[in-house]
Amino acid sequence: MIGRHDETNMLLDCLESDRSHFVAVTGRRRIGKTYLVRQVLGQHFTFHATGVAKVGQRRQLEEFTKSLRKYGSQSTPMPTDWFAAFHTLRELLESSPAEKKVVFLDELPWMATRRPEFISALESFWNGWAAWSSDVLLVVCGSATSWLVSNLFQNTGGLHNRVTRRIHLQPFTLAECREFFETNGFAMGTTDLLEAYMVFGGVPYYLDLLDKRYSLAANIGRECFAIGGQLRHEFDTVYTSLFQHWEGYVQVVRALATKRKGLTRSDIIKATRIPNGGRMTKILTELEQCGFIARVRPFGRKNRGSLYQLIDFFTLFHINFIEGSDPDPQYWQKYGTGPAHSAWAGNSFELVCRAHLRQLLQQLGVGAVITTATSWRSEQTDPGAQIDLVIERADNVINLCEMKYAPAPYLITRSLDEAMRYRRSVFVGETGTRKAVHLTMVTPFGLVRNMYSDSLQSQVSMEPIIRG
């Protein structure tokens, strides 16, 4: 298994513990939650059931009953409600000789069908028996992270603080993607690896669809643009499966896709015409919890003026290219260049840098220094002056990061050098900071050395980050 070392160790620790544990695994759809649990704990399952999308309680109970019978309750009639279902599960576990009774409830939000009875029954099962038995490992997961947050992590009733371990599964890093491709026999250079990340975002399911016999461009064409391509309709599948009344969520991500620097809440309201209030708060909160957008705090502030940015790579790629395109397996080979590609790649590369902030800090040699990542936009001198990544460090240094995508070492021109110096001057003047302000360039392959590159305080190449 690629990566997931900390998550694997946490699950194994719970398996070997001398008390019961309630583990919740969250993460974006297709990120590998089920795969992780099955790989680590599959041989120890005492019971496993999976929720079914878009069906009612009766169908969910039918599927749960099938699982009960599969694991030993042969003569079990279908329970009339979830309380009866969990009571039967308890009887099954009590009769099991296993040293640790491992229960895996996959796609829990689908199983619950948004009905409070399910949560009450789960609460009764855990509080009334499992938590006191010392030998139960209950693992639940679901792609609807917002549902799990509301109903488990922020539960104010009987399940308050009952989850003993939380695992949030992140996309693969660039280094893990490199390891994945090498393990699976792909011949892929740094440029292709970066482009694969900018399209698929380190989502294991998407990467696993690629065929090593073809080039990256051919793979993108086959999976994203061909009739029958596995990802041609993935955007619709993801959003309709995760969110009730999904139309508003899609409106928001579409609006954010048009502004690479991000939008304020008021900007989003104007763009979508969704009224300011509880519904907009719910949409933004759930999109953020599920990992599709991020809220970037302005430098020197807590929340006021925060920008929301679309950070899901595949969503951005779909809106820019797949949506509205004619079916053509050679689409990306034909059109994966030019101004539209350059604009998208520049935006996506900035997202790659933000997604690897920890590794970027290590390359700067400040991995052990407390840091805060923000953005900044001039509100006095020049509204056009903006810095997308400001790293404020506890050692009294601020890095103003300029992130530039190029398929070769990047050449800093006189005009770019002047623009960076100007932005630094405006930043220092408006913020009044007394810290040292360093100009930092982040590129895929480093810089062409010239008089302007030598004037930078620091630079970061992505190649060491890819090597891990």
Image: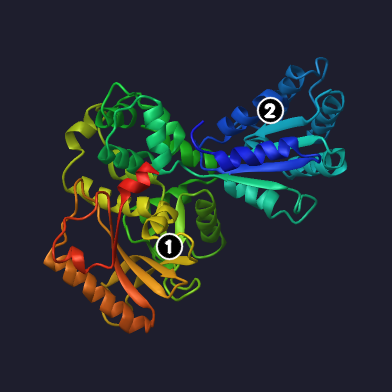
The answer to whether any part of residue 144 appears in the image is: no
- Percent across and percent down for residue 175 are 40, 41
Q: Is residue 247 left or right of residue 166?
A: left
Above or below, 201 relative to 97: below
Q: Nearer the viewer, mark 1 or mark 2?
A: 1
Q: Tell me, for residue 366, which label it has, or none.
A: 1
Q: Residue 252's image quarter? A: bottom left
Q: Residues within 10 Å of mark 1 (few under 14, many from 20)?
A: some
Tell me how far mark 1 sits from mark 2, CA to CA.
Answer: 45 Å
Q: State the quadrant of the C terminus.
A: top left
Q: Residues within 10 Å of mark 2 (few under 14, many from 20)?
A: many
Chosen colour scheme: rainbow
Label 2: state its secondary structure: strand
Q: Amino acid at mark 1?
A: Val
**Residue matched to label 2:** 49
Q: Residue at x 65, y 42 (%)?
A: 10
Q: Amino acid at mark 2?
A: Ala
Label 1: state its secondary structure: loop
Number of dots carrying numbers: 2
- Percent across and percent down for residue 227 are 31, 25
Q: Which callout, 1 or 2, points at the residue further toward the start of the chain? A: 2
Viewer-nearest residue: 72 or 435: 435
- Percent across and percent down for residue 242 are 53, 42
Above or below, 177 relative to 156: above
Q: Is residue 444 left or right of residue 334?
A: right
The answer to whether any part of residue 98 appears in the image is: yes
Q: Residue 81's image quarter? A: top right
Above or below, 150 relative to 142: below
Q: Do tag 1 and tag 2 residues touch (Cβ < 8 Å)? A: no
Q: Is residue 1 left or right of residue 225?
A: right
Q: Residue at x 39, y 25 (%)?
A: 184
Q: Tell me, for residue 262, which label it has, or none.
A: none
